[in-house]
Amino acid sequence: MVAAPATASTSRLTRQLGGLLLSSSSSASSSSRIALPALASASLGSIRHSHVGSAPLDLPPSTSIQILPYPPHPNPSRPLLPSLRRARSVLVQGPKGEVLIPLHECINLSDAESRISLSIKDDSNKKQRGTWGLTRSLLNNALQGVSEGHTVSLKLVGVGYRASVEPDPLPRRSKLDIALSGEKSFFVSEAAKQAEIEREQRAKDSAEKQGAVRLHIRLGYSHPVLLPVPHGISVLVPQPNRIVLKGADREQLGLFASQIRSWRKPEPYKGKGIFVDGETIRLKTAKKK
């Protein structure tokens, strides 16, 4: 008869201890939930620097850079982009040619002891950090292009697909010639206009030494595809179904390669087309009725 109250008091004590443990665990979990947003806000508040933009660049001994006070204008017959109106230019010159890249107003460039470093004005601005890394990549490509050169290879896959290089008998006009012959042009200043004319003349002089050429490609059409090679690009055809493009400007090489590829894009059923730099495509099986 005495054991029953003892058992009841023991069970009551057990329930109280369990409640205390549950309350302590819930308070600990709530405190951890409170601490997580604080850590998240602290991590969001911290500024992440551009690992690409902050990496310095080595200036090869045979190259030189020059900062120009006006932005690059690839097509003077059209208005300049709003993002480039306050930008400057970096002229990179070397044994393989010259490349002009934009330098936005938020980017600071310092050249000391053949070492180039870039910085931005506001580290907390996400757009400036993105422009920082982009400018560093463009400058790296330009330095590599004028010193060593860039190469793009194209492969023609298809029955009867072949290419050859032949002299170009037709006269050609550049975008600068079209802008100068037109009634209206969109040059930023007279100094920028004169500098573009001088750059175009240097490109024409170097092209005259090599001679104007064009690509003659057979791609299964009833007519051959004739593509004039832009100034600053040299074309080699080591095999009838292989084209090799070389030049200092990587952007110009990629644009010309995309123009060639657009005539026969790779198709997924027979695997035919023009493939750029080891491009592959997954073949599909045709639907059977």
Image (cartoon, grey):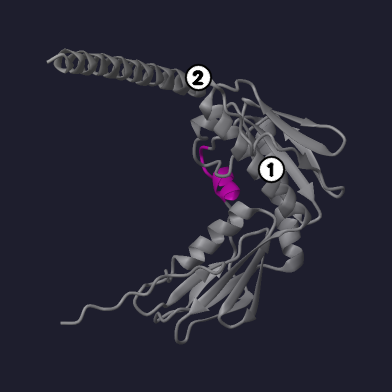
Q: How far from the left and from the top, in percent, is residue 6?
A: 20, 14
Q: How far from the left and from the top, in percent, is residue 254?
A: 56, 58
Comes first in the chain, label 2 or label 1: 2
Q: Residues within 10 Å of mark 2 (few under 14, many from 20)?
A: few
Viewer can see residue 187: no
Q: Amino acid at mark 1?
A: Leu
Q: Magenta residues?
A: 175-184
Main secondary structure type of the part rendered in magenta: helix
Residue placed furthest toward the bottom: 160
Within the image, what quadrant is residue 155 found in?
Answer: bottom right
Q: Nearer the viewer, residue 278 or 196?
A: 278
Which residue lies under the disc numbered 1?
139
Q: On the picture, is 149 further left or further right than 18?
A: right
Q: Residue at x 62, y 25 (%)?
A: 106
**Image quadrant where one finds the C terminus:** bottom left
Q: Residue at x 75, y 52 (%)?
A: 146
225 over 70 or under it: above or below: below
Which residue lies under the disc numbered 2?
42
Q: Amino acid at mark 2?
A: Ala
Q: Is residue 179 magenta?
A: yes
Q: Residue at x 73, y 63 (%)?
A: 208
